[in-house]
Each structure stands twice: as C-alpha cells, then as structure tokens.
Image (cartoon, rainbow, N blue to C red):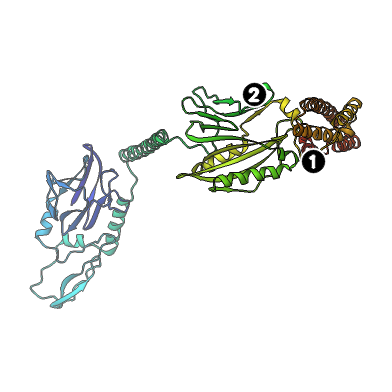
Amino acid sequence: MIRYIIYANKEKVQEGELRAGEWIVGRSRSAGIHLPEPDVSGKHLKLDVVSGLVFAENLSSHGTKLGETPLTERTQLKDGDLLVLSKSTEIRFEISAAAESADDSGDEGKTVIPMPGTPREKTAVPEDGGMKTRLPGTAVPDPVPGSVPAAAPQETQSEKTETGPAEEAEEDINKTDIMRTRLASMEEMNILRNSDRKRTVGKKLKYILAAAGAVALLVLLYSLRPTPREANLTWPLDAAGKEMGDFCDPGNGGYKAGGFSMAFPSVNGKTKITKEPGNLRIDTWFGKDASVPLRILFLEKQSPDFLTMERKDVFTKLLADLQEEDRHWNLSQISDVFFIGSENGLPCLSCEYRREEGKRSWYGEILFFRTGDKAYMRLAETWVSERARGQSFISNTPFLKISQQYLREHWEGGPECAVSGKNTAAMLDEVSRHLSKQAPFEWARTDLLLRIVLAESIRTGNQADLKTALSQLQRLRAMQTVWYNSQKIQYNAAKLEQDRHRENAVMELCKTVFSSPDDLRYFTLRRNVWE
C-alpha cells in the first residue's frame, strides 16, 4: 500500500492512498491531489504509480525538492521520502513492504484497476500454450481442463483475491473518485479563507496605490503646466489686480476743461508719449501681464471744406491722404455710424486696416469723428500675430473720455450748411423764439439754423455769433434731454398699466421729434430700446 501525508506549516492537513495510475498534484481544481496554497502551481507535480512503485516528476517553474535536493528529472520515491512543493507545503510518502515486494514478484496474472482518464494497459496471459490479450479489470476465465501446459504455475489464493471480479474494481474506482471530491477540512477552509483575504487586501492596496499615484501625477502635471495665454487681451493689471490706465490731453484742454482726453493703458517704465502739433503717439502695452505691444495714434485735421461735406466723405478723404503718404496700407470697408457717450451722443465711423512698417506687420482700427471744421482720427494697433487675441479689445475700446459739455456743444456741417451771405442775426432771433416756446416739433428746424450760423461764423471769423450759437445749442440739447426723459417716464408708466395705446402714442411722438440720424436717440427709439 502507498500512502501520502500532506503537511502545511508543519501541521497535517491531508492524507490519502495512491493507487496505480497518474496523479497530478497542484492548486488546480482538476488536480487529483488538490493543494490550496497560493505559491503552489496549478499543475505542480506528477506522480506515476506503476506496479507498486512511485515516480515523481516536477511540472512547475517554482520547482520541487526531494528533501534538500531539487527534483530535476523523473525520480523513484522510497518509503519516508519527503517532497517540498512550496515554503510551507510538504508531502511524505509511506510505501509498505508489500507494495515493494509486489514489484519483485512481477505483475503477471494480476488484475490492474486503472485510474479515471488513464489508458487501460493490455496484459498478456498464457492460454492454450500461446499468448492472449485481455483488458485489466476483467475476470480471468477458468482454464479449460487439459488446455494448460504442465509448466504453467497455479494461482495462489492471494492472487485470486487481488484480481477480484469486475464489480470490485468498479467499487475501488468509485472510492478514488470520492476521495478526490471529498469535503474540505476545517484546516483547508481556513487556509482558503486566509488566501482569499490576502488576495483581496492585496488587490485593494494595489488600487489605492494606483489611485494615489495617478492623483500625485495629475497634481505634478498641473503645477508644472505653463500659465495659459489670455484668449482675449484686456487692460494690464497691477499687483493688486487693479487696471492700470491714464489720461492724456490731445490738445483741447482735456475732458476736465469741457473737451475730451485720450485714455490708454499705462505701464510704469514701459509707456512712452510723444506729442506734436496735430499728432499724438502713445507706445504702451496691454494684456493682463502687459506683454503685448499697443500703439495709439491721434491725428487732427482742420479744413473749411469739412463744413460743407458729408461725414463719410471727410473720412474717405483722410484715409486717402494716409495711403498717399504711405502706400503700405490695406484698408477695409468703412462701418455704419455708431455713437459714443449718452444723450445725443457722438457719431463716429470706423475702419479696420493692416499696414507694413519695416519688417513688422501691424493690425489696427481707425475711429473717426468730427466737430465743425475739425476732423479727428484715433488709430489703435498691435502686431498682426496678436490680432486674434487683441481684436476685441481694440474694436470695443474707444480710448476716449468725453465730457458732457463737449457732447452738448458737438455739431457737424454738411451740404445744407453751404449757405453764405445769410443774416445770421435774424437766424439767432428765430432760434431764440423757438427755444422760448419750448416747442419740440420746432427743434429740428432750430438745430438746422444753429448749424448754419455756426458754419458761417467759422467761415467769416465772427466769434460773437459763434459764441452765441454754441450757447443756444447747449440750451437746445438740455431741453431735448429733459423732454426725452419725461417721455420715457410716461412710456414706462403706460407699460406698467398695460395701456398699449398710450405706449404707442408716446413712442410715435418721440420718433417725430427726434428725426435726425445724427442723434443717438433716433436709433434708440426706432429699436424700441430706452436708455
């Protein structure tokens, strides 16, 4: 009889009997001898039981030791041999003398019960003086009298018992299957639980370490990433986050004196202002970190021809003069009229451009407005390479601070002012009568008379009429503002009361009074957007 005893951590956890055939030892569930240790391979060891002898062969890359010697080839085991499969798993074999002597006497005439899955061996027995093949596990037929040679030995009682009928062989096979599918002992269950617990804890630890590493990597990448560029450039900021800017008088006294001033980004040590008659240049920087160059130019032109020209014609003439001085200008279309300021507003035109200066290309926008016989152009430009980020800032920033007095004294000439030899004193008397009556329907006529008087006063140099006309113009603008605000109050009251008839009446009245497209309120009313 061949028995095996398995020890884990020096404690016996499993034992059994080996019968003839091939046995696989390992962690796999299909192994004939199942070992749950995690450091045992699925198919770690193969045992061959042949004719009462046991042969061991290592199948694992982890190796198997016979005592202290590594098992490198198929080796026959002896009684008391110890196989070491892992750090804590040992298999001891007990091979009885009966099994060893069975090998010496030979296996001829014995019935061999194969293990499941192993091929059945064919055994030759003498019959009728010759050899006849029979399958192991079948009954040996009784010899026919007279057919057995005299030299044939007689079977012993022990051999008859070992051979047994086919039913006994089937019963032995069933016993082996039961051994392989038996319930695990408490020791084995504890080993399995500890193994699963260690495996689960190991997986959780790996996941936690992986997550912590990913977070650390993200933090490192975020800290090392460069500061993102501004999508749209704005005013430069100081250390406290306040916008850095300043004002400059272009030559009319500035907004504090009733005129207007240039507003620009001011960076300490990096902003330069150059003044010449009719020409102001500011070299500065913009963007939150003041890293992008910005150039602001202010040009002033004066001509009596402007008194009788349309606004757009004056702007076109000035653009032509620029191109004549320097042909490296590429101009776009002139925009429609828009306004800066409140109340009547300051009507303006604009035009984008691109020009070459040396080896540098510049992109910018020209803002145009005029008063009387003076026309002004404000140019704001930056490098073409920064156009995508700086275009919004340049287009939406007028770089002007205009006083309320300048807006109320603002007027423009036109073809309707091409009147000479008229009696300006009579015109001023008519204006005075209209303003005294405070008749809104006469304000359009009043505005026209004042512009004619102003244009004529400039042409003739009559400073007295010029001063009187400007004073009356301010009076007209103040009256228009008061009346406009009162009508806005009535409109809002009618809207709250849901009086649509009164709403429409107020709106139509205002549209009739403010009928000049040179007034901001003309567009406000027609878009139905009150200030």
Tell me where residue 19 appears, x and y as whole percent.
22, 55
Pointer 1 residue:
418
Residue at the spot 27% in from the left edge and 53% down from the top edge = 32
Within 10 Å of the Cα at label 1, are there few (<14), some (14-19), or many (20+) other Cα atoms?
some
In the depicted structure, whether residue 343 falls above or below residue 180: above
Report whether 63 appears left or right of 274.
Answer: left
Report whether 183 appears left or right of 165.
Answer: right
3D distance between C-alphas at marks 1 and 2: 30 Å
Tell me where residue 64 appears, x and y as whole percent.
18, 48
In the depicted structure, whether residue 469 falls above or below residue 9: above
Residue at the spot 23% in from the left edge and 37% down from the top edge = 9
Question: Mark 2 is on which residue type?
Answer: Gly
Point out which mark residue 253 bears: 2
Question: Mark 1 is on which residue type?
Answer: Ala
Quarter of the image that includes the C terminus: top right
Tell me where residue 506 appears, x and y as whole percent.
88, 34
- The answer, for residue 336, to whether it is visible in the render is no
Within 10 Å of the Cα at label 2, are there few (<14), some (14-19), or many (20+) other Cα atoms?
few
For mark 1, give the secondary structure. Answer: loop
- The answer, for residue 485, to whether it is visible in the render is yes
For mark 2, give the secondary structure. Answer: loop
Q: Marks 1 and 2: which is nearer the front?
A: 1
Tell me where residue 113 appears, x and y as whole percent.
24, 61
Name which of mark 1 and mark 2 comes first in the sequence. Answer: 2
In the depicted structure, whether residue 96 falls above or below residue 21: above
Quadrant position of residue 158: bottom left
